[in-house]
Amino acid sequence: MSAGAQPDPASVPGQNLDRNAARQWLKLQIDKEPPILKQIAALHKEAQLNAFKARDAKKKRSAQDRLSNTPVTALLRKRADVNPMMLIAAGVATADHILELGASGLRARANIDANAAANWVNAARDVKRAQPGDDLPAPSPSDWCEEDVGLVRSLLILESAGLLRYAPHTQGLSYASDRARAVLKGTNWLRWKFKASASDDLAANVAELSEWVSSGNGEANREQVESHLARHMTLVEDLRDPNEVARLWGGKHEDLLTLLREEVP
């Protein structure tokens, strides 16, 4: 350890540390983790979950729009034995309406046999099946539906939460507790019993970590973390406005689509 950075001998295991004393000290460092780090981790997890939900909502909306916009005349085009005009005459105009009725309802409504009804329903189901691009927002905000706005909003929040969680100053504040968790895993009974260097490794790791804790380097990051968190919360509030969502999309759409592919598969 460097001079002036010695840990308090009353609170840190000494050179002749034993496993139990080391574990107790490491657990203390974990317990001292600043609550703001748990808040940031929870915000990031929530942002990921919301992005998944928003993507699924967009996929469902895309399928529903496709059903509503597909006329029965576009179904079973290659089938010479079907006549869509029978459905139109019965008031069945779209693939969506076919699925609403189901095979039995369609049969009764259009006065067609069971086999024909099943064919129409299967054709409508083909339209509903997921297609590439179903989970992508429309390129232009002028064409957005509610689900597009929700998806882009969720991606903007996820991007911001990820930058906050993995920022250098956040990592600096969390170093002590993160490192303590990693070192603690190395003190399990089997490792301690069968690895000859386990005691020396633990002593070196505790010495390194105790020097970091006593240096105050971790706490020096707290103010930046708090400021970054405040900026994130302001962004979340601003994104309640769909116009702000659309504005940010204009300069970030490529990055957000990459985020969608890589973190919301």
Image (cartoon, rainbow, N blue to C red):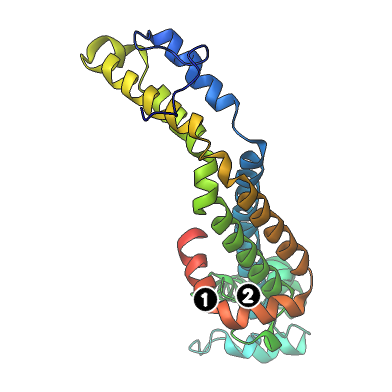
Q: Residue at x 50, y 40 (%)?
A: 217
* Residue 49 appears in the picture as rendered: yes
* Amino acid type, residue under disc 1 in the picture: Gly
Give the image location of residue 216, x and y in percent: 53, 36
Q: Residue at x 47, y 22 (%)?
A: 7
Q: Which residue is under mark 1?
A: 133
Query: Within the image, what quadrant is residue 125 found in?
Result: bottom right
Query: Within the image, what quadrant is residue 112 found in?
Result: bottom right
Give the image location of residue 83, x and y in percent: 62, 89
Q: Is residue 57 left or right of residue 9?
A: right
Q: Would you place residue 23 above or below residue 218 in this image?
A: above
Q: Would you place residue 176 above or below residue 149 in this image?
A: above
Secondary structure beneath label 1:
loop
* Amino acid type, residue under disc 2 in the picture: Ser
Q: Residue at x 62, y 78 (%)?
A: 249
Q: Would you place residue 62 above or below residue 52 in this image?
A: below
Residue 62's disc is 2
User: Along the polypeptide, which appears first: circle 2 or circle 1?
Assistant: 2
Give the image location of residue 173, x and y in percent: 54, 42
How far is the residue under mark 2 from the one under mark 1? 9 Å
The N terminus - image quarter: top left
